[in-house]
Image (cartoon, grey):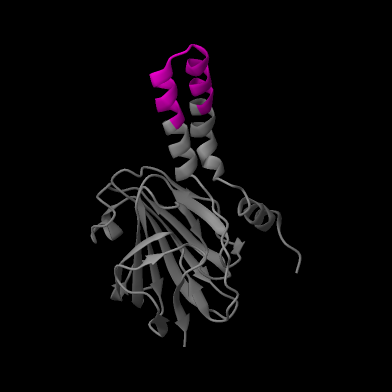
Amino acid sequence: MERSQKEEGLISQNHWPMAKEGLPFLIPSAILTAIVAGLGWNLLTFLGILLTIFIAFFFRNPKREIPDLPNMILSPADGKIIHVGECEEDRYLKERALKVSIFMSIFNVHLNRAPVSAKVIEKSYNPGQFLVASVEKSSLLNEQNALVLETEDRFKMLLVQIAGFVARRIVCYVKPGDTLRSGAIFGLIRFGSRVDLYLPLHVKPLVRVGQHVKGGESLIGYRV
C-alpha cells in the first residue's frame, strides 16, 4: 500500500537524532555559547556548554527497535508506570477500560510513539491546570490532548498526552483521518509530563507499577 505524505514525514522523523522542536532552543544556545567563548568569558562559556548539552539531551531521539509481534501493545512513552487498573472512561470510549499511566520525568525521552498501527478517529485538546503529572487527578484536570485510535479490525483505544507542573507545551503531529504505524513518533510533551493509555478490558497487562518502560519498545500488554 502506498504511503501518504503525512506517513512519510512521520517515518523520516523517527530517524532524526533529536526532535525538531528542540532546534529553536539548541541553535541560540550554541550560538551564544560560541560568542561568549570568543570573548574569553570562561564561566559563561562553561554554563553555555552545559545548557546546550542539556537541551540536546532532553530533545534526544534515540534509535528504537520496534517489536513486530501480533496483538502486542507498545508503550507510547518513556518513563515509570504509576498506575495499572480498571476505570470508567466516560469521556471518549464511554465504557470501562484498563488504564495504564506513564510518568515522564524531565530526564526521560519525551517523544511519544504509537502503541499500535491504527487510524486516528478522534482528537481533542483541552486546556487545563498544571498539577504535578504524577498526581492521579492530573488525568482529568491538567492540560491534555486525547487521541482515539482504531485498528483495521476495530480494536479501539484512547491515548492522552497530559502536561505536568513544568511541561507547558503538548505537541501532536496527527489529526483525525491520519494513520500511524506501530512505534511511529506522533508528538511530544516538553519538560516533565504523563501519558495515559485506556485499553479494552480483554487486554492482558504486562507491566506493573514502578516498572520503567521505553516508548515504542517495551510491551504494555497483549490482546487475548
The image position of residue 81, as x and y in percent, is: 33, 66
Q: Looking at the rendering, which quadrant does residue 198 occupy? A: bottom left
**Which span of residues is magenta-colored?**
30-49
The image position of residue 20, as x and y in percent, is: 56, 42
Q: Looking at the rendering, which quadrant does residue 204 occupy? A: bottom left
Residue at the image position 49 percent from the left and 74 percent from the top:
73
Question: 182 or 119, which lies in front?
Answer: 182
Position of residue 86 relative to residue 190, above or below, is below
Position of residue 67 relative to residue 4, above or below, is below
The image position of residue 14, as x and y in percent, is: 61, 54
Question: 33 or 173, which lies in front?
Answer: 33
Position of residue 151 relative to residue 27, above or below, is below
Position of residue 98 relative to residue 11, above or below, is below
Determine if residue 175 is in view. no
Determine if residue 106 is in view. yes
Residue at the image position 47 percent from the left and 69 percent from the top:
218
Count of numbered marks = 0
Which SS does the magenta portion mostly show? Answer: helix
Residue ranking furthest to the top: 39
Quadrant including the N terminus: bottom right
The image position of residue 99, as x and y in percent, is: 34, 72
Taking the image as shown, residue 53 lies to the left or right of residue 179, namely: left
Q: Looking at the rendering, which quadrant does residue 151 occupy? A: bottom right
